[in-house]
Amino acid sequence: MKIRNNKDALVVGALIAGIVIISEGIIRCLNSENIIRCILIDSSFWFGMFTLGYGLYAANKSESEVLPDERTERNYQRAGSTTFWIILVSVGLMLLANEKGLYNLETSDVLSATIFIGLFSLFILNSCYNKRGIGYIIRTVKENKLLFSAFFILILISGLIVLINCPSLIIPDNLGNIGFVDDSNILKPAQNFAECGGNFTEYRDIESAKQALVDDSIFLFFVVHEEYLDTGRITVYSKEGIFSDFTPTTTTAIEGFLRKTLLSYANVSDEIILKLENPEITEKEIDDLLKRANTTYEMSQRIQHPMVEEKVIVKKGDVG
């Protein structure tokens, strides 16, 4: 194919980029236990499919239909500017939700949501500014029935395969069942954990906790390390799957569990504990109360910030 104009350059670039990205996604999944499932849920593969599809679509269009004129270019700039502010506000709201503890957002969650919001906003605003609307979308689909039908069928089949082969897409029933392994020896055997917002079960070692995790007896478990009082380090183990980071409530439950444990370990009186549980208490008031309880600075910091979290994904093959 000869490159005679900008449209040809765009088509060739899109086709080459699509093939390269698809190949990269497939190669990366070759060592996976389930190659088909890995490919179907790989974002690189689908981005490559989109790029390749756009190249095939643009190849059958004239240059005036593919490349924007001066008026359309101005509308693109308007849509891009508005989309930028939408993304900015969206990210700000996500950060606020995370800060207030409404949802424990992972970095991947924020990036995925930002990309989706940006692309969706740009598409809608571009159609609005160019006054194309739903009619333009319908006409485009009608003119490219074969291409859009193929992509629709492929996406539908892929979704069904993922649902069949990925039981972790179903929200688990054991979200409140949390296990733990205590290597720090700060937990008291007779301590009552029922008030911490979860059903906590102690395991003697990591292997027995992993087995319970694989058997779905617990949703996740965490290990309190030997140097916990100095570092606050714990490791959270969960099963692989789309809900492996689904912990807006479990994170709060674990923090409450550790805080209650530390208060008991430091022999803080019930009167002070009751005051510390006041949701409107300030950080300075917490410091003053803990000083009254004769806790050390390190213990005070650990009570206020009870966990430095590390995450480990457990696969079935990891359990002997």
Image (spheres, rainbow, N blue to C red):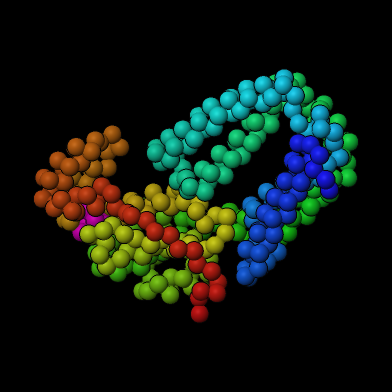
Tell me which segment is drawn in magenta: 260-265
Residue 287, relative to residue 236: is it above or below? above
Residue 50, relative to residue 6: is it above or below? below
Q: In which quarter of the image is residue 184?
A: bottom left
Report the residue at 52% width, 63% height from top: 239
Report the residue at 76% width, 46% height from top: 12
Question: Residue lying farthest bottom?
Answer: 320
Front-lying residue, 88 or 73: 73
Q: In which quarter of the image is residue 163?
A: bottom right
Front-lying residue, 283 or 192: 283
- The picture places residue 11, in percent across and down from the top left corner, at 77, 43
Front-lying residue, 251 or 49: 49
- For residue 263: magenta? yes
- For residue 158: magenta? no
- The picture places residue 258, in percent across and down from the top left corner, at 30, 55
Name the chief secondary structure element in magenta: helix
Residue 244 seen in this snapshot? yes
Report the residue at 23% width, 60% height from top: 229
Image label count? 0
Report the residue at 66% width, 64% height from top: 27
Residue 170 placement, left or right of 15: left
- The picture places residue 251, in percent across and down from the top left corner, at 41, 51
Front-lying residue, 26 or 90: 26
Residue 188 seen in this snapshot? no
